[in-house]
Image (tube, rainbow, N blue to C red):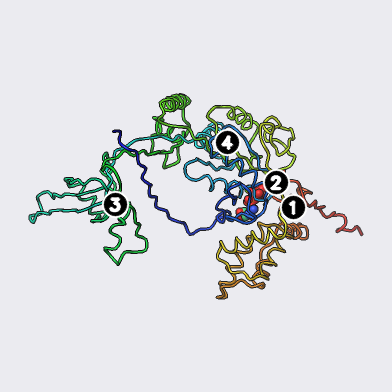
């Protein structure tokens, strides 16, 4: 009889960082089972069309159906493009690789642009490697360890394990005894022992012994006594990215480079060999390819060389799904003098499906701000929230989000746990938004350095940004009137 295959749930220790980033409130796309977006769910608010579209893309990625597609998230600043990409990443889970990069990163690495992109692409393709291991799984009936009084002689021990059908006594070596002591294994525990490594894992306590002790903690997990034979085969699946395999096999770097992140350039031959090997594993049924996602934020920062490289890379059979985001309109393609929608060449745009994001309405802004207040642990009463929403409408959502944190600090300074309207007023006057800052510059420009150089003041960013305000420099002749 062939040994049955059982799957043992892997336990993962989770540690949460007590830190809160711009998108830390986002836990998924907030869709229901029919892929319809809920108005507010998993930290996501509104932007229904874009979330619905993202949900469909996500579903196709999960099914492993698509590879080598490109998706563009396009919309005004602060309309949640990056947030939607983060939501997709959270919803994909651990087993599908998701690489997140900003387009400008490729200019700051010590390698060529195409190498940086190739590495990013290969980081986004997972290889699921299947492995079978032999394990012993059963409920502990008895553990006996003899420690000889002299202390110098070897410890000896016996372990009795049972399933619902059989019971066996195993002799324990010193190493196994140490493992069992360390895991505090006692009668009534259900454990697995990996035969190859001797690793002991406690799955929980047996239901049958649930009443033996009254003083068990709330976190004690109860499991059924295993059925069938004690020795079982277990299939384990590891997901590694092609990039990780590259680094491990590249002789100049060695696998330690994975930890330092200093991988340098990887030779083409190494990659060819690995592609061939992976294809071989695939045919033998030992592994499968899991195309993941490469997210390139601020995609207008890529230049023409990168765009044509991506054109080609998308057609490769082992290509991930590439998602880009941009807030630019019709603008110059970096590295050329040509203009194009979103600063992306038409031939690449033609290969993309475009998801657009639209500005929020008052109600949605209020919900997002409310979620952010909770995320940042700031208690803001209803009237304060209305003021913040008003500010978000008049200035920008980002500015209003910044005010939450700063107002929170001000409130704490006066030993209050609630942010008052006065706190918000105070930080509103302390920190300028873009509009007021421009106004200030207009009034006092003569006192700043270099103000006379350009007649135009842009809203920040690089030269492509469409200018909101045009400032006419004050005519010198109007000040110095001739006598
Ligand atoms: N629909 C939403 N639900 C919840 N939070 C949102 C939503 N949209 C935006 N946010 C939050 O608002 C802030 C700004 O959004 P985000 O950074 O995603 O904008 P963006 O479209 O990427 O802008 P840019 O073009 O400037 O990069 C972030 O903190 C984001 O988490
Ligand atoms: Mg963004």
Q: Nearer the viewer, mark 2 or mark 4?
A: 4
Q: Nearer the viewer, mark 2 or mark 1?
A: 2
Q: Going 80% across and 51% down the picture, which residue do you hit?
A: 470
Labels 3 & 4 near each other (Cβ < 8 A): no
Q: Which disc number belongs to residue 75? A: 2
Quarter of the picture holding the N terminus: top left
**Structural distance between the alpha carbons of marks 4 and 1:** 45 Å
Secondary structure of residue under mark 2: strand
**Structural distance between the alpha carbons of marks 3 and 2:** 54 Å
Relative side of 121 to 190, left or right: right
The residue singled out by tag 4 in the image is: 321
The residue singled out by tag 3 in the image is: 190
The residue singled out by tag 1 in the image is: 451
Q: Nearer the viewer, mark 3 or mark 2?
A: 3
Q: Nearer the viewer, mark 4 or mark 1?
A: 4
Q: Which of disc 2 and disc 3 is earlier in sequence?
A: 2
Relative side of 363 to 416, left or right: right
Q: Nearer the viewer, mark 3 or mark 4?
A: 3
Q: Which of disc 1 and disc 4 is earlier in sequence?
A: 4
How far across and how far down the image is residue 300, in percent? 66, 39
Indicate yes or no: mark 2 CB to ligand 1 under 8 Å.
yes
Labels 2 & 4 near each other (Cβ < 8 A): no
Q: Nearer the viewer, residue 148 or 40?
A: 40
Q: Is residue 232 above or below residue 266?
A: below
């Amino acid at each position: 009889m062939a040994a049955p295959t059982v799957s043992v749930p892997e336990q993962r220790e989770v540690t949460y960082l007590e830190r809160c980033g711009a998108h830390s409130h986002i836990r998924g796309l907030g869709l229901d089972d029919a892929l319809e977006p809920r108005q507010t769910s998993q930290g996501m608010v509104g932007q229904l069309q874009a979330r619905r579209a993202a949900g469909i893309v996500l579903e196709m990625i999960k099914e492993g159906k698509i590879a080598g597609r490109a998706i563009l998230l396009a919309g005004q600043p602060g309309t949640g493009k990056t947030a939607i990409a983060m939501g997709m990443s959270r919803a994909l889970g651990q087993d599908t690789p998701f690489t997140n990069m900003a387009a400008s990163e490729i200019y700051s690495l010590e390698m060529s642009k195409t190498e940086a992109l190739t590495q990013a692409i290969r980081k986004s393709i997972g290889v699921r490697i299947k492995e079978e291991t032999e394990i012993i799984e059963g409920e502990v009936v008895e553990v006996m360890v003899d420690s000889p009084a002299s202390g110098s002689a070897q410890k000896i021990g016996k372990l009795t394990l049972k399933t619902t059908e059989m019971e066996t006594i195993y002799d324990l070596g010193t190493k196994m005894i140490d493992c069992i002591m360390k895991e505090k294994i006692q009668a009534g525990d259900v454990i697995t022992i990996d035969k190859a490594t001797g690793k002991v894992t406690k799955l929980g306590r047996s239901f049958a012994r649930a009443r033996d002790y009254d003083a068990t903690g709330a976190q004690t997990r109860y499991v059924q006594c295993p059925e069938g034979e004690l020795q079982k085969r277990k299939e384990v699946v590891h997901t590694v990215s092609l990039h990780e395999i590259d680094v491990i096999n590249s002789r100049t770097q060695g696998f330690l480079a994975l930890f330092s992140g200093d991988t340098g350039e990887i030779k083409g031959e190494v990659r060819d060999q690995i592609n061939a090997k992976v294809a071989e594993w695939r045919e033998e049924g030992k592994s499968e390819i899991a195309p993941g996602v490469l997210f390139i934020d601020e995609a207008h920062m890529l230049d023409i060389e990168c765009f044509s490289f991506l054109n080609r890379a998308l057609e490769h059979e082992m290509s991930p799904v590439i998602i880009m985001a941009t807030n630019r309109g019709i603008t110059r393609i970096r590295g050329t003098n040509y203009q194009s929608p979103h600063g992306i060449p038409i031939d690449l745009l033609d290969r993309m499906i475009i998801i657009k994001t639209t500005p929020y309405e008052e109600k949605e802004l209020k919900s997002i701000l409310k979620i952010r207040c909770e995320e940042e642990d700031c208690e803001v009463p209803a009237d304060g929230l209305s003021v913040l929403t008003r500010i978000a409408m008049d200035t920008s959502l980002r500015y209003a989000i910044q005010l939450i944190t700063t107002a929170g600090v001000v409130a704490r300074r006066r030993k209050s746990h609630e942010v008052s309207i006065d706190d918000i007023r105070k930080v509103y006057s302390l920190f300028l938004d873009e509009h007021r800052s421009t106004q200030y510059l207009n009034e006092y420009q003569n006192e700043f350095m270099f103000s006379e150089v350009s007649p135009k003041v842009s809203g920040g960013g690089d030269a492509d940004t469409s200018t909101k305000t045009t400032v006419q420099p004050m005519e010198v002749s109007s000040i110095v009137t001739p006598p």
